[in-house]
């Protein structure tokens, strides 16, 4: 690939996995790849660990814990023609860079690949149809985009507490860009292999879900049907947990209230955002809306 690749790695209090991620990048990628770490706000010595390395070009310190803010902050500092976004808990597998190089050597807008390991292995490449539009969902922890695509999207939507990459995939499709699946562009993680699973944030999950559907497609009946079907499906799964003795009826009821409140909040805010940004990019909370993401920037590219 003749064009410069910038890799944005978002991290938060996960120094050991971050260092493994950077080691894998160094082993798989050529020296001219631009590596940008967005940290924050970590309290585990990540800043000092990055200062001791010579393979990071830019360290961006932020005060916001949201992934969408982190990714936008990294994009602001990047200079590459292609921007790759990674999560700190993942390591690139051998051939990851070559897969990106091969894909963008031809015509490509966005490319993604398998995310392996942990409690959730995501290797699905089949598009799903939402309101008649085919959507190829990708992980924000393993995706590369042409710079022109990120510019057209105005980055990630910083309103969304979770699932900002899914929202981005909807907007990519809305703008007519193609997502290329490359099975060789793989990352893996060992996080979560002990069998433990974190409690779901039902409020945030449905807030984000209803927000992105309403923002991208409007208050049409099919949107409400998708939300209702998702809620019924999740309620059924949770009810089976109650009967199996893994949860209490009180918790089940409380989760249902969180689902309702989150969905209602997302619907209202989604409608506001839809009419707040009537352009096809549907991003009223993007890169261009603020300039105060970075608390401090360490830039070693000129040294």
Image (spheres, grey):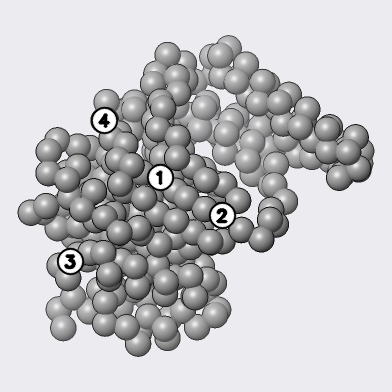
Q: Is residue 214 left or right of residue 168?
A: right
Q: Which badge, 2 or 3, is on the more N-terminal residue? A: 3
Disc 4 element: loop
Front residue (pair 49, 246): 246
Residue 291 in view of the camera:
no
For disc 4, the marked residue is 177
Q: Residue at x 37, y 80 (%)?
A: 50
For disc 3, the marked residue is 30
Q: Position of residue 119 (x, y in %)?
A: 60, 51
- Whole-number angstrom distance, CA of label 1 to CA of label 3: 22 Å
- Whole-number angstrom distance, CA of label 3 to CA of label 4: 28 Å
Quarter of the image for the C terminus: give it: bottom left
Disc 2 element: loop
Badge 2 crowding class, 10 Å Cα cut-off, few under 14, some 14 to 19, many 20 or more, is some
Q: Which badge, 2 or 4, is on the more N-terminal residue? A: 2
Disc 3 element: loop
Disc 1 element: loop
- Whole-number angstrom distance, CA of label 2 to CA of label 3: 28 Å
Badge 3 crowding class, 10 Å Cα cut-off, few under 14, some 14 to 19, many 20 or more, is few
- Whole-number angstrom distance, CA of label 2 to CA of label 4: 30 Å
The image shows residue 131, relative to residue 257, as above or below, that is above
Q: How many marks?
A: 4
Q: Which badge, 3 or 4, is on the more N-terminal residue? A: 3
Residue 231 in view of the camera:
yes
Residue 114 image label: 1
- Whole-number angstrom distance, CA of label 1 to CA of label 2: 13 Å
Front residue (pair 76, 196): 196
């Amino acid at each position: 690939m003749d064009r410069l690749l910038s890799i944005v790695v978002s991290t938060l209090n996960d120094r050991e996995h971050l260092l493994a991620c950077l080691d894998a990048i160094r082993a798989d990628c050529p020296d001219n790849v631009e590596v940008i770490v967005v940290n924050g706000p970590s309290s585990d010595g990540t800043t000092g660990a990055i200062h001791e390395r010579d393979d990071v070009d830019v360290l961006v310190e932020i005060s916001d814990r949201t992934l969408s803010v982190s990714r936008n902050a990294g994009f602001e500092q990047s200079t590459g023609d292609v921007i790759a976004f990674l999560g700190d808990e993942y390591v690139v597998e051998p051939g990851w860079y070559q897969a990106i190089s091969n894909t963008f050597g031809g015509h490509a807008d966005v490319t993604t690949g398998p995310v392996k390991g942990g409690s959730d292995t995501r290797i699905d490449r089949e598009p799903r149809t939402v309101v008649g539009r085919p959507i190829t969902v990708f992980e924000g922890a393993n995706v590369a985009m042409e710079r022109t695509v990120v510019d057209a999207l105005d980055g990630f939507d910083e309103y969304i507490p979770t699932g900002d990459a899914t929202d981005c995939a909807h907007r990519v499709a809305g703008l007519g860009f193609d997502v290329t699946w490359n099975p060789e562009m793989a990352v893996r993680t060992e996080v979560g292999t002990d069998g433990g699973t974190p409690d779901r944030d039902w409020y945030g999950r449905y807030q984000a879900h209803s927000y992105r559907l309403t923002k991208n497609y409007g208050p049409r009946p099919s949107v409400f049907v998708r939300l209702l079907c998702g809620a019924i499906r999740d309620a059924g799964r949770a009810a089976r947990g109650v009967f199996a003795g893994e949860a209490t009826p009180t918790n089940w009821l409380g989760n249902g209230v969180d689902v309702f409140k989150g969905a209602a909040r997302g619907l209202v805010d989604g409608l506001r955002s839809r009419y707040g940004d009537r352009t096809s990019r549907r991003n009223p909370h993007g890169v261009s809306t603020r300039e105060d993401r970075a608390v401090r920037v360490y830039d070693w590219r000129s040294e």
